[in-house]
Image: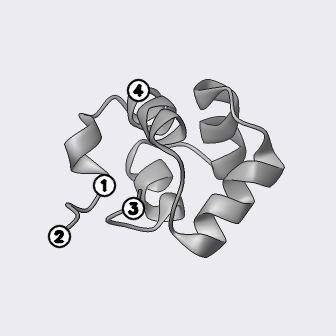
Amino acid sequence: MKLKRNLEIMAALNDMTLGQLADKADIQRQNLSIIKRRGTCTALTAVKIARALGVDLTDIIEEED
C-alpha cells in the first residue's frame, strides 16, 4: 500500500519521533525506516501505523486505481 504522506511528517503531527511511532505501532525501527524510504508497506503494517497515529487507515494510504 502506498502512503499518502511522509512518515516523519505524520509522526511529527502527533508529537512523536519515528522511533516512538515504531514502538507504538509494534514495528521494528529498521522496518519503519525502509517504509519511510520506499513510501509503501503491507496492509497489516499500514493498519498498525494508522492505529499508532490514531487515524483512520484511509487517512494514510493512497487509493489504488
Q: Could you tell me if the residues under marks 3 and 1 are in contact, i.e. CB atoms within 8 Å?
A: yes
Please state which amino acid type lies under the numbered disc 1: Ile
Please state which amino acid type lies under the numbered disc 3: Leu
Q: Where residue 19 sits in the image (x, y, percent)?
A: 72, 44
The nearer-to-camera label among 4 and 2 is: 2
Query: Which residue lies under the disc numbered 2?
Result: 65
Element type where label 2 sits in the image: loop
Q: Residue at 44% of width from left, 63% of height from top? A: 9
The nearer-to-camera label among 3 and 2 is: 2
Q: Earlier in the sequence, mark 4 or mark 3?
A: 3
Q: Earlier in the sequence, mark 4 or mark 2?
A: 4
Query: Which residue lies under the disc numbered 3?
Result: 3
Q: Where residue 13 sits in the image (x, y, percent)?
A: 38, 51
**In this picture, is 49 found above or below 60?**
above
Asked if residue 31 lies left or right of residue 56, the reply is: right
The nearer-to-camera label among 4 and 1 is: 1
The nearer-to-camera label among 4 and 3 is: 3
Q: CA distance from mark 4 to mark 1?
A: 13 Å
Which circle marks residue 14 in the picture? none
Q: CA distance from mark 4 to mark 3?
A: 14 Å
Q: Could you tell me if the residues under marks 2 and 1 are in contact, i.e. CB atoms within 8 Å?
A: no
Q: Residue at 30% of width from left, 55% of height from top? A: 61
